[in-house]
């Protein structure tokens, strides 16, 4: 349950996410730009309005594909099987990612300042996928997903996002925050999943969330280039 042990929870987390702040290790930050692969990119924060979400046939098909697996959602409990799975995943990807799970999720003393929950997918007793999200009162923030590379054909990364949204809807949570997107860097494009029609994009200069579209994204990016070139 939520207690004072978690400084970043409840209404505070809701307000931070709405303002474009997001977890980095055990703190929150915001930014409008970054350097990836030695190139400069402008960044734009996203959220999904869960009152508008409609799961597509492909997503329901994905759910059907994975129905043989067991799903458990509970308060975060880091343990050896989670570390082992993360290390398998980290060794198999060619994408910038944290090197040590503890460095990302907890402080050196094991404290987590966020009220976090885990989504675990099991094939019988084998942990094959793990997702983490932070929970406020009216929002959740998707923090990390990883899975057993041997199960790649099951699209478990997308399935974890689906499960997080499904959890939020069932708990009357309004928004799901997946992080940021970058123009010209397609490895972040998965964050508009699972329903682009329900996604919103933050205009940080006006502090306004707009319905997401490619036109809005490129207009915001163009303004950023003009101002900060």
Image (tube, rainbow, N blue to C red):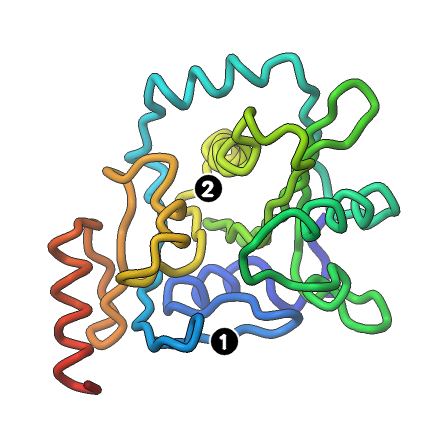
Q: Is residue 153 left or right of residue 151?
A: left
- Residue position marked by numbered label 2 in the rendering: 173
Say whether residue 46 is left or right of residue 144: left
Q: Residue at x 12, y 82 (%)?
A: 226
Looking at the rendered structure, the number of numbered marks drawn on it comes to: 2
Instruction: Describe residue 194's horizontal placement relative to residue 98 as left or right.
Output: left
Between 148 and 174, which is closer to the camera in this rendering? 148
Picture disc at residue 128: none
Q: In which quarter of the image is the C terminus?
A: bottom left
Q: What element carries label 2?
A: loop
State whether residue 151 is above or below residue 140.
above
Circle 2 or circle 1, nearest the eye: 1
Q: How packed is label 1: few (under 14 Cα within 10 Å), some, or many (20 or more)? A: few
Upstream in sequence: badge 2 or badge 1: 1
Question: Which structural element holds mark 1?
Answer: strand
The reply to whether the C-beta atoms of the residues labelled 2 and 1 are less than 8 Å apart is no
How busy is the neighbourhood of tag 2: few (under 14 within 10 Å), some, or many (20 plus)?
Answer: many
Residue 121 x %, y %? 68, 29
Q: Residue at x 67, y 30 (%)?
A: 150
Q: Where is residue 144 in the image (x, y as percent from the top left)?
A: 59, 51
**Where, by quadrant of the figure, is residue 28 drawn?**
bottom right
Task: Tell me the residue at 67%/25% (across/down).
Answer: 71
* Image position, residue 184 (x, y; %): 28, 61
Q: Quadrant of residue 112?
A: bottom right
Q: In this view, does 180 lie to the left or right of 200?
A: right
Identity of the residue drawn at 72% across and 38% down:
74
Residue tagged by mark 1?
29
The CA distance from mark 2 to mark 1 is 23 Å
């Amino acid at each position: 349950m939520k207690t004072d042990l978690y400084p970043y929870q409840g209404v505070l987390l809701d307000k931070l996410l709405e303002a474009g702040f997001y977890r980095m290790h055990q703190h929150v930050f915001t930014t409008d730009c970054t350097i990836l692969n030695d190139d400069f990119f402008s960044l734009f924060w996203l959220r999904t309005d869960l009152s508008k979400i409609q799961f597509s046939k492909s997503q329901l098909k994905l759910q059907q594909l994975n129905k043989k697996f067991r799903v458990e959602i509970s308060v975060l409990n880091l343990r050896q099987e989670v570390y082992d799975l993360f290390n398998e995943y980290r060794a198999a990807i060619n994408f910038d990612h944290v090197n040590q799970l503890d460095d990302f999720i907890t402080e050196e003393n094991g404290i987590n300042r966020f009220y976090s929950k885990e989504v675990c997918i099991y094939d019988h007793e084998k942990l094959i996928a793990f997702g983490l999200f932070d929970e406020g009162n009216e929002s959740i923030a998707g923090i990390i997903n990883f899975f057993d590379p041997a199960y790649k054909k099951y699209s478990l990364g997308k399935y974890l996002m689906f499960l997080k949204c499904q959890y939020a809807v069932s708990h009357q949570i309004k928004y799901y925050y997946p992080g940021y997107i970058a123009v010209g860097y397609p490895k972040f494009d998965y964050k508009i999943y699972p329903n682009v029609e329900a996604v919103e994009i933050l205009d940080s200069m006006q502090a306004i969330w707009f319905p997401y579209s490619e036109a809005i994204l490129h207009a915001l990016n163009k303004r950023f280039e003009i101002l900060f070139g």
